[in-house]
Amino acid sequence: QNSIKINPAGTGKAEVKINKHIYGHFAEHLGACIYGGFYVGENSKIPNTNGVRNDVVAALKNLKIPNLRWPGGCFADTYHWKDGIGPKEKRPTIVNTWWGGVTENNSFGTHDFLNMCELIGTEPYLAGNIGSGSVQELADWVQYTNFDGESPMSKQRRENGREKPWKVKYWGVGNEAWGCGGNMTADYYANEYRKYATFITDWNKSGDLFRIASGANSADYNWTETLMKNIPGTLLEGVALHHYSVIDWNKKGPSTDFNEQQYFTTMQKALQMEELVTKHSAIMDKYDPQKKIALVVDEWGGWYEVEPGTNPGFLYQQNTMRDAMIAGVTLNIFNNHSDRVRMANLAQAINVLQAVILTKDEKMILTPTYHVMEMYNVHQDATLLPIEIKTKDYVMGDKKLPAVSASASRDAKGLTHISLTNIDSKNAQEVSIDMPSAKNGGVTGRVLASGKLQDYNSFENPKKIQPATFKDAKLNAGKLTVKVPPFSVVVLEVK
Ligand code: AHR
């Protein structure tokens, strides 16, 4: 029997808010994420505002994306921001060495990105170039985007058409410094971090600049330990972590034509996030018991082989119900750890890896992952209701995984939301939830389900998978009984 107790008495913990920034996204200069995805240029016949697709802006507004990370990824440590400002016809080109070796014309730069964030209503998160850049270059970028007074950088910004600074709060100090960001050791990077972070100046005396250290690769706990030990808390607001749900880096398997064994392994990798955030958090607790520093999972998601016939350097993959399951379980994990996990970024927003949006010329589709993120956005900035969960197993041979994952929160209007993901590929799961103070019948819900795990939304059938009204929840005498279909996501609202 599956059962959930909400807000069990005696947890003794202070109330925690689920930071909306857990629901962040990521836009790298990679394949068709920026060019063709977000940006088509002012002269495109695709409806756009300053070159940014109007359909994409509307979809991301509806998703309530709280932040967007840019320009990478590995690309960030090759990017020189000054090449992407000023008249577009005068901008130099850049060869994208990490992703397909394509030559880009820099027509999408700092103004284009930051103005686009304003259009979407999301906060920018800029990743600085530590690998091949300089302290001066990053310090100048901060001054250019954030300084209101008179200075060489603010003067240039004004000459380029922007009077007021954008006041960017979130700054990444490099990316994957242990790998594409410079192949540094943890000790070396910690010193580099200290130097760079010192020159990320709080020009507006806002007191809320947020500097994020390039974090560990999955279970590299030594990385987090070294950073926490060697970087003073006065220089650090967030420590990153990257973890992808990949079956095997040498044999990732197809994105749609996968078998159940591959599905099971993907779920194993996704659920590993629980252990990762628990262990990285425990290390952070040793050095920062008051939890002032956030764990920022600024890259996560499923990673498969690219679609047949597409450029292997562009990481273009379809998105099935398997991806909906990754999103459902991962977001529940983040919610339940929101005392420490206060920001995260799904990789990536459009046309790359576990995308929420796919585009093909003038067409745009929303993926199952989009729908899960939209259904879950009721948790953004709500109060976490800790849960105790007992769940049956999803069994494959001699291996098993917890079938049901869940999280719960109370919003500003006093409504309780419970998100449930059943990863079991065959069995529906009946879950009973104690809700002593809820009114009989006061429950509504939505469900994302489909006939086959491998189902996806295509350009020919864009609405095959979309949320529907959920009718299998009954609330009686303080007991909520829910029947969650196989491989589905359910979000309930209880009055
Ligand atoms: O998201 C794709 C790539 O994965 C990013 O550029 C890099 O940071 C990670 O290895």
Image (cartoon, rainbow, N blue to C red):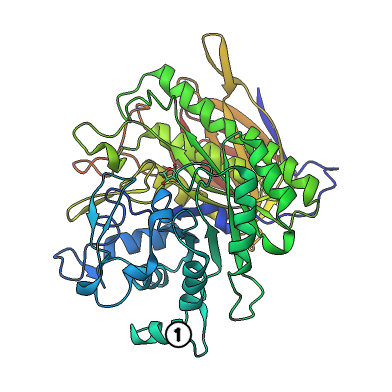
Q: Is residue 479 above or below residue 213?
A: above
Residue for point 50% across, 55% down? 24
Q: Position of residue 298 (x, y in %)?
A: 52, 49
- Ligand 1 lies in quarter: top left
Q: Position of residue 54 (x, y in %)?
A: 27, 65
On the rendered structure, is 57 left or right of 16?
left
On the rendered structure, is 127 left or right of 39?
right
Front in this rendered view, residue 335 or 33: 33
Task: Evaluate whether residue 295 shows in this view.
Answer: no
Residue for point 22% across, 74% down? 90
The residue that label 1 is drawn on is 152
**Furthest residue toward bottom:** 150
Amino acid at pointer 1: Pro
Task: Evaluate whether residue 136 shows in this view.
Answer: yes
Identify the image quadrant of residue 274.
Answer: top right
Q: Position of residue 460 (x, y in %)?
A: 18, 41
Instruction: Classify the position of the N terminus by image quarter.
Output: top right
Q: Position of residue 368 (x, y in %)?
A: 38, 41
Are there few (<14), some (14-19), or many (20+) residues within 10 Å of tag 1? few
Q: Is residue 383 above or below residue 186?
A: below
